[in-house]
Amino acid sequence: MLWSLLQFIRQTSTLADASIHADGTLHLIKEYQGLGTLEWHGKKLDIYTNAGAEYAARTWDIDNTSGSPVDLGYGAPGFNNTGCYAETLPGSSTTFPNSTGFQPGALAHCTADTRALIEGTLGFWYRFYKGPRGTFQYGTQYSYVTRNAWSGDGGSPHGIDGMVFTSFRYILP
């Protein structure tokens, strides 16, 4: 049970697990993860907070023949990040040549391999009825996520997102 929970948490960020050396061999990426949770449970109110972080190390390679860095791997300093803040128009991609304009545009020239993801969450559940007919409860959650990428040509892009979720639940008796 614990292993499946850890695997679920790990798969949410979709960080890479491996990269390829210049000679074509597979290289595992070193990663670090942490998760902390605090919860308080009352008769009608539950309050929770979670904080987590994930980090993936840089794994680029040197060409044995020329002795120069090779832009293979994960987070290589020569990767092109010049277009990370310039989004193309919807439907202008060559992937969808007959587009009606509803497919999202892709970022041009943006490798931006993730260096670190950090998320903090605060939320509550309020049970306004719990009895023989089931449980009615309402919950709200706020999550704050930041993503930092490895630097390359054009800088080190980052993203920040604040999200609010609400939910109304009926739990059968």
Image: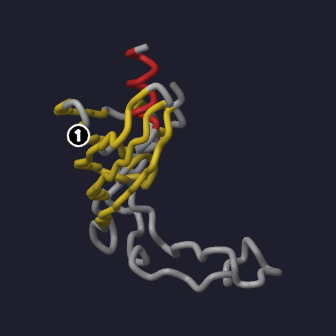
Dividing the picture into quarters, in which one does residue 148 lie?
bottom left
| Amino acid type of the residue that numbered disc 1 sits on in the rendered structure | Asn
Q: Is residue 24 left or right of residue 155?
A: right
At which x and y percent is residue 5?
41, 24
| Residue 60 locus on image (x, y percent) | 36, 46
Q: Position of residue 118 (x, y in %)?
A: 25, 49
The count of marks equals 1
Which structural element holds mark 1? strand
Which residue corresponds to the image point at 73% horizontal and 71% vertical from the top-left?
A: 95
Residue indicated by mark 1: 50
- Which residue is at the front of the view, 173 or 142? 173
> Does residue 2 appear left or right of residue 95 in this picture?
left
Colouring convention used in this rendered image of the protein? secondary structure
Position of the N terminus by quadrant: top left
In front of the other: 131 or 70: 131
Residue at 28% x, 66% y: name it: 156
In depth, the one of 26 and 65 nearer the eye is 26
- Examine the image and state in which quarter residue 38 appears: top left
Farthest residue to the right: give it.
98
Residue 121 % position (x, y): 25, 48
Viewer-side residue, 17 vs 128:
128
Q: Residue furthest top?
A: 1
Tell me: residue 19, above or below residue 164.
Answer: above
Residue 128, picture quadrant: top left
Seen at 31% across and 42% down, the residue is 125
Label 1 Cα neighbours within 10 Å, binned few <14 / some 14-19 / many ≥20: some
Check the image and report above or below for 159 versus 13: below
Residue visible at 36% across and 62% down in the picture: 78
